[in-house]
Image (cartoon, grey):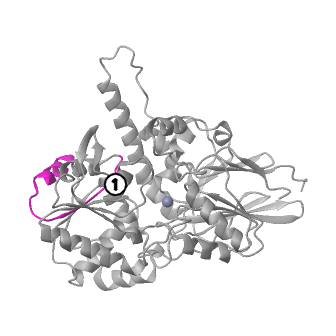
């Protein structure tokens, strides 16, 4: 094999921030993209970044996707539309989940573009905007997906082998392990993807990779400790019972993927054990309904608890009090509800989708509750609710935040500081460097200090940083 001259890693996104995951690994003239997610947060800035995929990414030979979350997968149709020709490798579950998520994302892009064009129709200076991508673009991108099982190596070229291990973050999530032959040695580069918590319901635990040389590692909660996983159900039950006593409704903004299924599973257990009294639960998210079907199909990914529950009680995500809300008309009818109920709806950070309508209709009533069960990025409506601002803007109108806000951190799908440290330690002392990504700076810096105290070397790259792994 000829001598390797180039072995470079470039950070194209999720550097000193938590969205827009995208990394480029160059092995001579072979280019691999890992993840191609949406940037989210400040609208204008994110839109510009999402519309301008770097040429090096568009020219890449192959892509590997860690998991189906939109901040990791959302711009894949944009990538393919702008000229990417290669295959997209991921787990079979991730491929099935993306089948729904990317088409749903395309419909949102088309809807938003049409709405903006209509709104500005009378403005003579308005230049009509095109959706970032359409449903047809998403379908074309999905044809490039190649599903793989966990722990099963595949070759990208004679120098490069890849395998995926369970990251325990959402169903089908993976850490990507890339072995590259470098001038007589094998070098292992690991992209952690998002790392889950140990003992999360439904999911198997994260599997730390063995013997990596370089690790690109997420640090979403590099400086935070979550409550114990065991307290999750108890906290949820308390929020529900307190709200019921006030005669109010519980609004749960939830990511359609994973969090919704965890909440359904939790409510199922709480109802069947009698811990909460029967209360109507409305699942108002067509996407979440479809993704729940994918969960039912991929029971091989369940942990023992979910498998046992499902053997004993049947469907872990279905129960008597659950009502599935498909049409927009049914969704609007929920405004008329006067008795206590639980409404689960997306999007998870309250930035779009039906949840925004439910928040508008319920947030000013002190009897109601908003139960936050997921990460809320800066500058999102969800973050403002978590901060318990007196007023929050919804559809351009300031609304008083009178509803009770419960923040259930234990529901996080992300490992906390201690769990990340466990994962990093398990990688072993031969790691040459950790590149800390996917975290706000204060989280990554604090985590770097923790690694440093343990004698582990790390760096916090910026977007655009390129490093050579050849001499490192
Ligand atoms: Zn994720």
Residue 350 horizontal/vertical position (percent): 34, 51
Which region of the structure is painted magenta?
328-351
The residue under label 1 is: 287
For residue 305, which quarter of the picture?
bottom left
- Residue 69 visible to an observer of this rendering: yes
Which residue lies at the image location 60% right of the left edge and 65% below the top edge?
Answer: 175
Q: Is residue 159 left or right of residue 193?
A: right
Q: Tell me if the residue at label 1 has its CB under 8 Å from ligand 1.
A: no
348 or 320, which is in the foreground? Answer: 348
- At 54% from the left and 38% from the top, the residue drawn is 49
For the view shown, which residue lies furthest in the front direction? 390
Please tell me in which quadrant of the rendered image residue 260 appears: bottom left
Determine if residue 438 is in view. no
Q: Residue at x 47, y 46 (%)?
A: 40
Answer with left or right where residue 79 lies relative to residue 371: right
- Label 1, secondary structure: give it: helix
242 part of magenta stretch: no
Answer left or right for 216 relative to 223: right
Tally of numbered tags = 1
Circle 1: is it few (<14), some (14-19), or many (20+) Cα within 10 Å? many
Left or right: 453 with respect to 288? Answer: right
Q: Tell me if residue 19 comes above or below residue 448 in the rendering.
A: above
Q: Quadrant of the C terminus?
A: bottom right
- Position of the N terminus by quadrant: bottom right
Q: Is residue 345 magenta?
A: yes
- x, y percentage for residue 330? 16, 51
* Residue 373 rendering spot, x and y as whole percentages: 36, 64
Q: Nearer the viewer, residue 224 or 228?
A: 224
- Residue 193, quarter of the rendered image: bottom right
In percent of width and height, residue 425 lies at 67, 76
Q: Work out which residue is located at the far top of the displayed protein and give it.
A: 124
């Amino acid at each position: 094999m000829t001598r390797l001259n180039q072995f470079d890693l470039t950070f194209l996104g999720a550097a000193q921030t938590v969205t827009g995951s995208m990394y480029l690994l160059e092995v001579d003239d072979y280019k691999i993209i890992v993840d191609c997610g949406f940037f989210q947060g400040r609208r204008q800035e994110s839109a510009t970044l999402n519309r301008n995929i770097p040429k090096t990414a568009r020219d890449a030979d192959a892509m590997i996707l860690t998991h189906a979350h939109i901040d990791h997968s959302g711009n894949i149709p944009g990538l393919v539309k702008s000229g990417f020709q290669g295959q997209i490798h991921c787990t079979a579950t991730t491929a099935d989940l993306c089948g729904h998520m990317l088409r749903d994302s395309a419909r949102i892009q088309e809807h938003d573009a049409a709405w903006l064009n209509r709104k500005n129709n009378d403005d003579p200076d308005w230049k009509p905007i095109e959706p970032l991508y359409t449903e047809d673009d998403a379908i074309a991108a999905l044809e490039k997906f190649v599903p793989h099982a966990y722990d099963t190596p595949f070759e990208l070229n004679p120098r490069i082998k890849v395998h995926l291990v369970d990251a325990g973050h959402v169903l089908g999530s993976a850490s990507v392990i890339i072995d590259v032959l470098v001038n007589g040695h094998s070098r292992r580069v690991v992209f952690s993807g998002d790392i889950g918590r140990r003992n999360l319901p439904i999911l198997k635990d994260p599997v730390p990779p063995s013997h990596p040389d370089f690790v690109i590692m997420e640090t979403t909660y590099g400086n935070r400790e979550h409550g114990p996983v065991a307290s999750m159900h108890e906290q949820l039950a308390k929020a529900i019972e307190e709200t019921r006593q006030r005669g109010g409704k519980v609004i749960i903004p939830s990511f359609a993927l994973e969090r919704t299924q965890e909440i359904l599973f939790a409510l199922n257990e709480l109802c069947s054990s009698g811990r909460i009294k029967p209360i109507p639960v409305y699942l108002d998210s067509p996407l979440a309904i479809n993704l729940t079907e994918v969960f039912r199909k991929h029971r091989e990914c369940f942990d023992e608890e979910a498998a046992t529950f499902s053997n004993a009680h049947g469907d872990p995500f279905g129960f008597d009090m659950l009502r599935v809300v498909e049409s927009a008309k049914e969704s609007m009818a929920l405004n008329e509800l006067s008795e206590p109920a639980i409404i689960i709806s997306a999007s998870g950070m309250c930035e779009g989708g039906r949840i925004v309508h439910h928040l508008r209709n319920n947030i000013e009533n002190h009897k109601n509750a908003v139960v936050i069960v997921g990460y809320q990025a800066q500058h999102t409506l969800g973050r403002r609710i978590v901060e318990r601002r007196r007023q929050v803007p919804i559809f351009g109108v300031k609304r008083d935040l009178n509803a009770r806000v419960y923040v259930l951190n234990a529901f996080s799908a992300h490992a906390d500081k201690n769990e990340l440290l466990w994962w990093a330690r398990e990688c072993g002392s031969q790691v040459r460097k950790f590149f800390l990504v996917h975290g706000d700076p204060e989280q990554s810096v604090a985590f770097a200090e923790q690694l440093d105290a343990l004698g582990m070397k790390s760096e916090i790259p910026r977007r655009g940083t390129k490093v050579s792994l050849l001499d490192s």
